[in-house]
Image (spheres, rainbow, N blue to C red):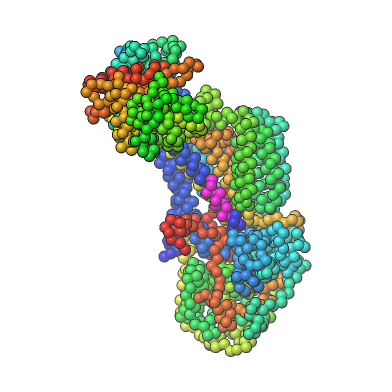
Amino acid sequence: MRQKRQRFRIMAALLIALLAVAGAYGVYTVSTYSSRWFGNTGNTRYQEARSTVIPGDVLDRNGVVLASSDESGKRIYNDDWYVRCAMVHITGDPDRNIPNAVDSFQASYLLGFQTSLRERIGTLLSGDRRRGDNVILTVDAQLQTRIAEAFASGEDTRGRPGAVVVMNYRTGEIITLLSIPNFDPMGDLAEIAQRPNSPFWNRAVRSVQAPGSTFKIITSAAVLQYMPGAANAEFDCTTGATQVDDQIIPDYGNGHHGMVSLADAFRVSCNNAFAQASVRLGSKYLRRTAEDFGFNDNFLFRDLVVENSSFPVDIATNGELAWSGIGQGRLLVTPLHMCMVASAIANEGVMMEPRLLLGVTGPTGIQRQGFTAKEYRTACEPQYAARIESFMKDVVARGTGRSAAVEGLSIAGKTGSAESSINNNKVTHAWFVGYIDEPEYPYAVCVFVENGGTGGAVAAPLAKQIFAWLTEK
Amino acid sequence: MAKRRERDDTDRRKKQEKMLVYVEMIFFFSAFLLLTLKEGWDWTGFLLAVLIPVIIYVTTVWLAGWLRADKLLMAIVNFLCALGVLMLHTTDRIAGFSRGIQQLGHYGLGLVVMFCCILFVRIIRRWKWPVRILLALSVILIILPVLIGKEINGAQNWIFIGGFSLQPSEIVKVSLGIILSYYMSERRFWTWFVFLAICMGALMLQRDLGTALVYFTASLILFYAHSGNVLLTLAGLAGASGAAVFGYHAFRHVQNRVAAWKNPWSDYHNTGYQLAQTLIAIASAGLTGVGLGLGSPCDIPYYFTDFIFAIICEQFGLLFGIFTMVLYAIIILRGMSIAIHTRYSFYGLLAMAVTALLGMQTFIIIGGVLKLIPLTGITLPFVSYGGTSMLSCMALIGLLQGVSSINQDEMKYDSQISCAEEAQPAV
Amino acid sequence: MPAEIYEVVALAARFWFLLLMGLIVWYSYRWYARERRARKRLLDELPDAGFVGEFVVMRSTGKFKQGDALHVPFEGTLGMLFDNDIVLDASGVAPRHIHFRYDRKRGLKMLPIKQNNFCTDRGSSEDSPAGLFAVHGTRLYVGDCELRLRMFEGYEVNPPPGETAPVYVPIPPVGQEAGLPPAAPAPIPYGPAAPVQADGYRPAGYAAPAGSFYGRGIPAEPPASPYGRRIRGRFSTGRVETSPTDGESVQTANPYRSRRTVYGFKRVSPDRAVSGTPEPQVQEAAPPQAEETVVKPTAPTAPGERSACAPVRDDTLQTAEPIRQEKTPPAAETVHTPAPEPEPAASASSAKPVQPKASRAEAIQRAAASADAAPAKGRTPEPRSAAHRLPAAEDELFQPLMDEDDWDSWEEIPAPHTPAALQQPQNNNDPDEEDWPYLSRPDQWRTEGLFADLLDDDGTDAAQPGGAYGSRDMGTTARRMLSRYFKGGGR
């Protein structure tokens, strides 16, 4: 019996531990995922709430009303067709075809689920109909509309799908979150659903693509951190192609760069050099650095649902490692995440959590939630960030990203041309990530054009326009 | 001086014990009153508002005293049962059923069964033949659904006899505890092992995986507690894992369950619907809930049995749900305490079997609802709607309380012959 | 109620419900924790709770000495490993050797585990696959050890009918054969069978003066031992209050005392206690009994009468405990002990019994006051008769009783405490009355120089029992582990 008694204690402790695990897991999931679950389209609660509550307004950072409601509680959007179209992936549409747009993701605010008891009593006594809270976003509707127009009218970008993200790299505020093609939320949604290139798809946060040469930012961070003598290392690009195992890594356009240093290789975006560097590094260090930059992490941002980026965890051959080092292969990343990578370099290696919510005010005007900037993670050490910044400035000054240079502004950037195949057709996606290195304009930009061609030719000019508009104000 | 302090202690103790009962009564009175006033005046709700506190008081304070039952267990079990009635009554108003009243009937019947079980444990002195009879009956009962069972929700675990429907696996759960603990204490391995194997085989044939999981884990816990044989316990665990992997590959519905657990949103409209709605319900409640009688609990299929924990969480909040889990934990602790203070290993194992069965059942369903483990359809003890489930859980608690009262008697006897006059056995 | 108003009310009410739920959880937990503490305290007060008796070591080659007592719980295992209920770390004992279970009607049933063997004085385990039953006084031979079972009162059983109690041959203590006189079956140096009433228990003037117990050249004042103090201090109600000045002891409330821990009193078997009130003058007039009457109850003529007076039973098998406060009766002293050497203390005690009457009256008043204090609080005052405290006949219904292999046989054996059993003369052979002489009484150990290195302050080598449910509590374990592994401390 004595042994049994001891084991009774152990087993009861086990049972209680199981219950404790269940409880802790419940608290954890509810605290991390509850806004995601609540904002799900399957939730009938806020549809029911619509019948009794007038949803609150959605405003941009300058007070432009993006969406509001009429007296019957029906959603009405901005009067300007252009603004409506440009902002549709943020505000959402009446049928909620866009998952996790503000209309559904912030429904607990917009439909007054966060209203305090005192306010409820006040509303009850006044006899008014209940109103939800107003949500103020960090986006700049005017800028986003201009970018959307430029994207739609640009020579190289016209008719192509793509995404543009602009964010403040010091605070993480998202200034622009544009996904093309867009549509008018007050249009015929059934017809829109038939259009090509799935317009309901918010490419800025949901579309994962190979980052192409823009990934070389992360590869160089890994080289700087983990490869001894990286500053003086030279890479062989005399033949224009490197054979790693059975894979042949060519340079874009079969360029020959001779023996190059890391800075030169970055400037000219030399695939050979980075393939060799990543093979020398080994997959362990490359992966570690990529994960420092947020790859393979479960993004649980407060205001945004972002598809997770992935760096392959099971690289078996050096050939695949070499492809990964230049941003091809099984690497997948969203435009928003690439913008965050550039922001991390700009912000001395610290990646900020992207925020979309500037504030929430109740119907009576009290502020329910303010804006707090929060660090997401530390991507790399400041000295390496500074080195990479100098590389990126070189790229804009005299490298592949010359077309992004703006007179009088210190701009850093990196172009990318990611090759992938859609329906067995080889296509090239154009990338550009960059930022303004000026204290009064702390903005990072990511331009992504699907099937656009090279980054330097297609994405960089659009980025240049954006830089100009950002500094115009 | 010391004596007076002791007396004061006794007074305070009794007062605090009464306080628990009073607080429970206030809770249910106010809750049912609120529901009564929701839409006009609802006489059913008012009846419940009066009846439930009266039941709680009478059973906890009077009946438990007479039967020398464990008052704390009584109070907690009463609270959980009444909580089930409350939740079902709430959803009744929304869904238009009368499950609350039916559950009240089950609850009353369960109390009767519980008292019968207390007397059963106290009166039976020689367990040999009762256990043999139980064994025979249980084998027949557990095999019966395989032959004449009706399939409901993918599991063929119901039988219908003359207008009554019952779930034999729930009844066998009670006798499983007795049979396992008896033959383990008699150190007759093969008897209980073969019985358990028959049960598991029958449950597998009925595709009642949740109950099989409860049976198996509880038996494993009991086996370890009895024998302390780590190797065999691990072997059992490994065998179960192997069976689980086999079942995963063999059965389509197991794969669906696991897929729904991994990502309920991926197949939202089909297999994942139930779990996704559950998570939405829990998420919409937050920490303090949406309020009693509000929310939309009926979105979740089978909200009244398997997912009643989600309804509790939705209406009262996650914090309340965690408090409910603490109550279950106190039942487990109490069961352990009773098991430890028994003098014969049969009673100890019986108490532990009850604890393990209730604890594992609670964990499996709550873990399933919270998406910690794949969902298997079993009921939350005492709270879920269902006559058989309620009766079996009450019978289990009755066994535990019977053991507890035997402990009390033994302790009293010891105190008498050891002349500790003030000794008042606790458990 | 309109929906909007209801919503607001329900929203407000959730805090109310949450508060109530928090209170419910808090009260439940408090209740649980309080009862846990109360039980712990109770078990501290009843160190014997959960034990039916003890195995006294007669002979062992292990680390045990003669006289060591191993507590026997209701059910458990005996073996060498540390986690057995009875740890018998001696050669020839298997890690788990015997599984035993107490049966209220038949004694301690013992079964060998696996291929192990053992013997009792009724046979060997090989011959009786159904298990061997041990009763009070049964010897058990396991490995190199010889143990003898001593059952606590209330748990005693008689040998089955037809079996006579074994005749024991005294065995001299191991290693003590030379140089010492053989431990003869010494007459029990105390306890004349003055008819003892259940309530009053101790006749007036019976008490010996303080110090007479250790009168053989040992300091009169019993040395303070934390163990002894602890145990005695807890028995606040049923304890005998001894006034150090006049040496009088008064039984205050409960005639029974711990089977183990209050020393110095003969045990009254509660089973045979009287339910009626005895006549005080009987014991006043009781002449010193002859020596035979110590062994048998005082010459009852009819069974009814016989059960009407409680025989004094010498229940102190030679355990590790001395009879500490034993008061040798002044009158009996000269009659009973044909002691080889004169005992000055004993003679002193015989000279002592003059006691100031006032102090005695005081003591009695004190006792009465303390006894009345409890009923004053509204509890029904319990009659102080022993029978009242006995398990009543209907309580028998609730006694746990385990199976035997033969289903019907138990009916034939009458319960030991029923009058039927008492009437059967062969059932009345108490094995511990005469034939228990293998070791001198513990109060003589010091004078005889036995176990000098083992005896502690109170003259015993008794280990403090851990309690049947014991084990170190988890808090203590955790603290120990913490200090050992994290604070760099250690034992």
Image quarter of residue C144:
bottom right
Near-viewer residue (C35 or C116): C116
Q: Please state the extent of the stretch shown in magenta in the rendering.
A: A5-15
Q: Residue at x 68, y 77 (%)?
A: C171
Q: Is residue B309 above or below residue C257?
A: above
The chief SS type of the magenta part is: helix
How many numbered discs, if any? 0
Closer to the camera in the image, B330 or A144: A144
Can residue C442 be seen in the rendering of this structure? yes
In front of the other: B99 or A252: A252
Residue appearing at x 53%, y 27% in the figure = B272
Quarter of the figure that contains the C terminus of chain A: top left
Percent coordinates x, y for residue A101 in the rendering: 39, 22
Q: Nearer the viewer, residue B108 or A302?
A: A302
Residue B7 visible in the snapshot: no
Q: Is C129 included in the stretch rendered in magenta?
A: no
x then y, percent, for residue C130:
74, 59
